[in-house]
Amino acid sequence: MPELRTTTLVDAPLRTVAAALLDARLLARAVRGLGVRITGGDPVLFVGSTLAGSVGLVNGTLVVTRADTTGVSAELVGGPLPRFTLVTDLLHTGGGTMVVDSVEWSSPGGPFGRLADVLVGRGLALKVLQARAAAVSTRSVELVGARVVVGAAIVRDGLLLAQQRSYPPEAAGKWELPGGRVEPGETDHAAVVRECAEELGVTVTPGDQVGPDVPLRSDLLLRAYAADLTSGTPTPVEHRALRWLPAADLDTTDWLPADRVLLPALHHLLT
Protein backbone atom coordinates (compact mmCIF):
# COMPACT_ATOMS: atom_id res chain seq x y z
CA MET A 1 0.00 0.00 0.00
CA PRO A 2 1.85 3.15 -1.18
CA GLU A 3 2.17 6.04 1.27
CA LEU A 4 3.79 9.46 1.03
CA ARG A 5 4.40 11.97 3.82
CA THR A 6 5.64 15.55 3.93
CA THR A 7 6.20 17.95 6.83
CA THR A 8 6.11 21.74 6.81
CA LEU A 9 6.76 24.21 9.63
CA VAL A 10 4.36 27.16 9.44
CA ASP A 11 5.10 30.38 11.34
CA ALA A 12 1.57 30.79 12.74
CA PRO A 13 -0.43 29.60 15.78
CA LEU A 14 -1.97 26.14 15.55
CA ARG A 15 -5.56 27.39 15.59
CA THR A 16 -4.77 29.75 12.69
CA VAL A 17 -3.26 26.94 10.61
CA ALA A 18 -6.29 24.77 11.45
CA ALA A 19 -8.52 27.54 10.10
CA ALA A 20 -6.50 27.71 6.88
CA LEU A 21 -7.00 23.98 6.37
CA LEU A 22 -10.77 24.42 6.63
CA ASP A 23 -10.84 26.69 3.57
CA ALA A 24 -12.48 24.39 0.99
CA ARG A 25 -11.07 26.40 -1.90
CA LEU A 26 -7.46 26.07 -0.74
CA LEU A 27 -6.85 22.57 -2.15
CA ALA A 28 -8.47 23.49 -5.47
CA ARG A 29 -6.19 26.49 -5.86
CA ALA A 30 -3.13 24.53 -4.78
CA VAL A 31 -3.46 21.79 -7.41
CA ARG A 32 -4.29 24.11 -10.28
CA GLY A 33 -1.80 23.44 -13.07
CA LEU A 34 -1.03 19.87 -11.92
CA GLY A 35 -3.68 18.22 -14.06
CA VAL A 36 -5.90 17.72 -11.01
CA ARG A 37 -9.31 19.37 -10.64
CA ILE A 38 -11.00 19.78 -7.24
CA THR A 39 -14.44 21.34 -6.71
CA GLY A 40 -16.71 21.64 -3.67
CA GLY A 41 -20.10 23.13 -2.91
CA ASP A 42 -19.35 24.61 0.52
CA PRO A 43 -16.83 27.36 1.35
CA VAL A 44 -15.52 25.48 4.38
CA LEU A 45 -14.78 21.85 5.20
CA PHE A 46 -16.80 20.03 7.85
CA VAL A 47 -17.34 16.38 8.72
CA GLY A 48 -19.44 14.91 5.92
CA SER A 49 -18.72 17.63 3.35
CA THR A 50 -17.50 16.49 -0.06
CA LEU A 51 -14.99 17.55 -2.68
CA ALA A 52 -15.33 16.29 -6.25
CA GLY A 53 -12.02 15.52 -7.91
CA SER A 54 -10.71 14.39 -11.25
CA VAL A 55 -7.34 13.42 -12.74
CA GLY A 56 -7.72 13.36 -16.50
CA LEU A 57 -10.80 11.24 -17.22
CA VAL A 58 -10.78 9.59 -13.79
CA ASN A 59 -13.31 11.00 -11.30
CA GLY A 60 -13.99 10.51 -7.61
CA THR A 61 -15.38 12.16 -4.46
CA LEU A 62 -13.45 12.97 -1.29
CA VAL A 63 -15.56 12.82 1.88
CA VAL A 64 -14.25 14.74 4.91
CA THR A 65 -14.04 12.54 8.02
CA ARG A 66 -12.26 14.98 10.37
CA ALA A 67 -12.08 18.78 10.45
CA ASP A 68 -11.00 20.31 13.75
CA THR A 69 -8.03 21.82 15.60
CA THR A 70 -6.03 18.59 15.17
CA GLY A 71 -6.21 18.67 11.37
CA VAL A 72 -8.25 17.37 8.45
CA SER A 73 -8.82 13.88 7.01
CA ALA A 74 -10.67 12.75 3.89
CA GLU A 75 -11.39 9.45 2.14
CA LEU A 76 -12.07 8.75 -1.53
CA VAL A 77 -15.52 7.32 -2.28
CA GLY A 78 -16.61 5.98 -5.65
CA GLY A 79 -13.22 6.38 -7.31
CA PRO A 80 -11.09 3.87 -9.22
CA LEU A 81 -8.85 3.05 -6.25
CA PRO A 82 -9.85 0.47 -3.61
CA ARG A 83 -8.62 2.91 -0.93
CA PHE A 84 -7.35 6.48 -0.86
CA THR A 85 -6.97 8.69 2.22
CA LEU A 86 -5.60 12.19 2.67
CA VAL A 87 -4.60 13.11 6.23
CA THR A 88 -3.20 16.35 7.67
CA ASP A 89 -2.14 16.44 11.32
CA LEU A 90 -1.13 19.59 13.20
CA LEU A 91 1.46 19.69 15.99
CA HIS A 92 2.36 22.70 18.13
CA THR A 93 6.09 23.42 18.39
CA GLY A 94 8.17 26.21 19.88
CA GLY A 95 8.89 27.53 16.39
CA GLY A 96 5.36 27.44 14.99
CA THR A 97 2.95 24.74 13.80
CA MET A 98 4.18 21.52 12.22
CA VAL A 99 1.92 20.41 9.37
CA VAL A 100 2.22 16.68 8.62
CA ASP A 101 0.55 15.71 5.34
CA SER A 102 0.20 12.10 4.26
CA VAL A 103 -1.56 10.30 1.46
CA GLU A 104 -2.11 6.56 1.32
CA TRP A 105 -3.74 4.46 -1.37
CA SER A 106 -4.28 0.94 -2.64
CA SER A 107 -3.60 0.18 -6.30
CA PRO A 108 -6.10 -1.70 -8.48
CA GLY A 109 -3.58 -4.54 -8.50
CA GLY A 110 -1.38 -6.41 -10.90
CA PRO A 111 1.92 -5.34 -12.45
CA PHE A 112 0.36 -2.42 -14.33
CA GLY A 113 -1.08 -1.06 -11.12
CA ARG A 114 2.30 -1.22 -9.39
CA LEU A 115 3.97 0.38 -12.39
CA ALA A 116 1.42 3.23 -12.33
CA ASP A 117 2.25 3.78 -8.64
CA VAL A 118 5.91 4.25 -9.43
CA LEU A 119 5.62 6.27 -12.65
CA VAL A 120 2.51 8.36 -12.03
CA GLY A 121 0.92 7.93 -8.61
CA ARG A 122 3.85 8.76 -6.35
CA GLY A 123 5.06 11.69 -8.41
CA LEU A 124 1.64 13.30 -8.69
CA ALA A 125 0.79 12.67 -5.02
CA LEU A 126 4.05 14.30 -3.94
CA LYS A 127 3.39 17.35 -6.11
CA VAL A 128 -0.13 17.68 -4.65
CA LEU A 129 1.17 17.46 -1.07
CA GLN A 130 3.90 20.01 -1.71
CA ALA A 131 1.50 22.43 -3.41
CA ARG A 132 -1.04 22.04 -0.61
CA ALA A 133 1.58 22.64 2.08
CA ALA A 134 2.68 25.86 0.38
CA ALA A 135 -0.95 27.00 0.08
CA VAL A 136 -1.63 26.27 3.77
CA SER A 137 1.42 28.27 4.79
CA THR A 138 0.40 31.27 2.67
CA ARG A 139 -3.22 31.16 3.85
CA SER A 140 -2.16 30.87 7.49
CA VAL A 141 -0.06 34.03 7.24
CA GLU A 142 -3.08 35.83 5.73
CA LEU A 143 -5.28 34.75 8.64
CA VAL A 144 -2.88 35.76 11.44
CA GLY A 145 -4.23 39.31 11.41
CA ALA A 146 -7.81 38.47 10.42
CA ARG A 147 -10.77 40.13 12.09
CA VAL A 148 -12.96 37.93 14.31
CA VAL A 149 -16.66 37.18 14.50
CA VAL A 150 -17.58 35.54 17.81
CA GLY A 151 -20.29 32.96 18.36
CA ALA A 152 -21.90 32.04 21.68
CA ALA A 153 -22.64 28.38 22.42
CA ILE A 154 -25.25 28.91 25.14
CA VAL A 155 -26.31 25.68 26.85
CA ARG A 156 -29.21 25.32 29.29
CA ASP A 157 -30.45 22.01 30.70
CA GLY A 158 -28.56 20.07 28.04
CA LEU A 159 -29.95 22.15 25.15
CA LEU A 160 -28.09 24.49 22.78
CA LEU A 161 -29.55 27.85 21.74
CA ALA A 162 -29.61 28.50 17.98
CA GLN A 163 -31.08 31.38 16.01
CA GLN A 164 -32.53 31.44 12.49
CA ARG A 165 -31.34 34.02 9.99
CA SER A 166 -33.86 36.29 8.29
CA TYR A 167 -31.35 37.90 5.89
CA PRO A 168 -29.49 38.10 3.53
CA PRO A 169 -31.52 36.02 1.03
CA GLU A 170 -28.85 33.34 0.58
CA ALA A 171 -28.70 32.74 4.35
CA ALA A 172 -32.37 33.29 5.26
CA GLY A 173 -33.90 30.29 7.01
CA LYS A 174 -30.58 28.79 8.08
CA TRP A 175 -29.44 28.47 11.68
CA GLU A 176 -26.40 29.80 13.50
CA LEU A 177 -25.02 30.53 16.96
CA PRO A 178 -25.74 34.00 18.37
CA GLY A 179 -22.86 36.47 17.98
CA GLY A 180 -21.26 39.11 15.82
CA ARG A 181 -18.08 41.00 15.00
CA VAL A 182 -15.47 41.95 17.57
CA GLU A 183 -15.14 45.73 17.61
CA PRO A 184 -11.70 47.45 17.54
CA GLY A 185 -10.16 47.39 21.01
CA GLU A 186 -12.70 44.81 22.25
CA THR A 187 -11.79 41.35 23.56
CA ASP A 188 -13.53 38.24 22.26
CA HIS A 189 -15.28 37.68 25.60
CA ALA A 190 -16.50 41.28 25.76
CA ALA A 191 -17.89 40.91 22.23
CA VAL A 192 -19.78 37.74 23.22
CA VAL A 193 -21.38 39.57 26.17
CA ARG A 194 -22.31 42.63 24.07
CA GLU A 195 -23.66 40.66 21.10
CA CYS A 196 -25.86 38.44 23.29
CA ALA A 197 -27.28 41.54 24.99
CA GLU A 198 -28.00 43.18 21.61
CA GLU A 199 -29.29 40.11 19.75
CA LEU A 200 -31.05 38.23 22.54
CA GLY A 201 -31.61 40.68 25.39
CA VAL A 202 -29.76 38.45 27.86
CA THR A 203 -26.63 38.47 30.00
CA VAL A 204 -24.08 35.68 29.53
CA THR A 205 -20.75 34.67 30.99
CA PRO A 206 -18.39 33.38 28.27
CA GLY A 207 -15.98 30.51 28.83
CA ASP A 208 -13.59 28.41 26.76
CA GLN A 209 -13.40 28.33 22.97
CA VAL A 210 -15.51 25.66 21.29
CA GLY A 211 -14.08 23.99 18.18
CA PRO A 212 -11.62 25.52 15.71
CA ASP A 213 -11.43 28.97 14.19
CA VAL A 214 -13.48 28.91 10.97
CA PRO A 215 -12.55 31.03 7.91
CA LEU A 216 -15.44 33.17 6.68
CA ARG A 217 -13.59 35.33 4.19
CA SER A 218 -9.98 36.11 3.35
CA ASP A 219 -9.71 38.43 6.37
CA LEU A 220 -12.48 37.20 8.68
CA LEU A 221 -12.73 34.29 11.15
CA LEU A 222 -15.54 32.79 13.25
CA ARG A 223 -14.51 31.89 16.80
CA ALA A 224 -17.09 30.31 19.12
CA TYR A 225 -17.12 30.26 22.92
CA ALA A 226 -19.17 28.34 25.46
CA ALA A 227 -21.41 30.73 27.41
CA ASP A 228 -23.58 30.45 30.51
CA LEU A 229 -26.93 32.25 30.55
CA THR A 230 -26.88 34.34 33.72
CA SER A 231 -30.02 36.49 33.37
CA GLY A 232 -32.89 37.22 31.00
CA THR A 233 -35.00 35.21 28.56
CA PRO A 234 -33.63 35.00 24.98
CA THR A 235 -35.72 36.92 22.44
CA PRO A 236 -35.10 37.01 18.64
CA VAL A 237 -34.43 40.74 18.25
CA GLU A 238 -32.80 40.56 14.80
CA HIS A 239 -33.54 36.97 13.76
CA ARG A 240 -36.55 35.02 12.55
CA ALA A 241 -36.71 32.49 15.38
CA LEU A 242 -34.88 30.82 18.26
CA ARG A 243 -34.67 27.13 19.18
CA TRP A 244 -33.25 25.14 22.07
CA LEU A 245 -31.72 22.09 20.39
CA PRO A 246 -30.97 18.71 21.99
CA ALA A 247 -27.88 16.84 20.83
CA ALA A 248 -30.07 14.53 18.72
CA ASP A 249 -31.21 17.48 16.56
CA LEU A 250 -27.82 19.09 15.91
CA ASP A 251 -26.97 17.12 12.76
CA THR A 252 -30.41 17.50 11.16
CA THR A 253 -30.65 21.29 11.68
CA ASP A 254 -30.01 23.41 8.56
CA TRP A 255 -26.93 25.27 9.83
CA LEU A 256 -24.87 27.82 7.97
CA PRO A 257 -21.72 26.05 6.67
CA ALA A 258 -19.38 27.85 9.11
CA ASP A 259 -21.46 26.77 12.12
CA ARG A 260 -21.68 23.20 10.80
CA VAL A 261 -17.90 22.95 11.24
CA LEU A 262 -18.48 23.29 14.99
CA LEU A 263 -20.94 20.37 15.31
CA PRO A 264 -18.48 17.75 16.66
CA ALA A 265 -17.38 20.22 19.38
CA LEU A 266 -20.99 21.20 20.10
CA HIS A 267 -21.95 17.53 20.52
CA HIS A 268 -19.12 17.20 23.01
CA LEU A 269 -20.28 20.34 24.82
CA LEU A 270 -23.81 18.96 25.24
CA THR A 271 -22.73 15.53 26.39
Image (cartoon, rainbow, N blue to C red):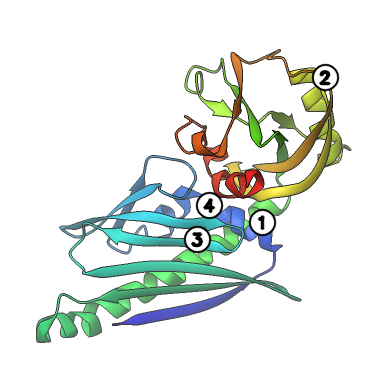
Please provide percent x and percent y for residue 228: 80, 36
Choose between 147 and 35: the one closer to the eye.
147
Vertical order, 85 against 52 (above or below) = below
Answer with the quarter of the image where residue 54 lies: bottom left
User: Disc 4 to disc 2, how far (Cα)?
Assistant: 35 Å
- Look at 79% across and 19% down and name the residue there: 198
The amino acid sitting under disc 2 is Gly
Vertical order, 94 against 257 (above or below) = below
Image depth: mark 3 or mark 4 in front: 3
Q: Which comes before the other along the chain, label 4 or label 2?
A: 4
The amino acid sitting under disc 3 is Val
Q: Which mark is residue 16?
A: 1
Within-10-Å neighbours for mark 3: few <14, some 14–19, many 20+: many
Task: Identify the element where label 2 is drawn.
Answer: loop
> How many numbered marks have been drawn onto this rendered protein structure?
4
Vertical order, 187 against 126 (above or below) = above
Residue bearing mark 4: 22
Q: Which mark is residue 72?
A: 3
- Look at 21% across and 68% down and name the residue there: 81
Please provide percent x and percent y for residue 7: 54, 78
Q: Which comes before the other along the chain, label 3 or label 2?
A: 3
The extreme front residue here reads: 157
Choose between 256 and 142: the one closer to the eye.
256
Q: Are marks 3 and 4 in contact (CB under 8 Å)?
A: yes
Q: Which mark is residue 232?
A: 2
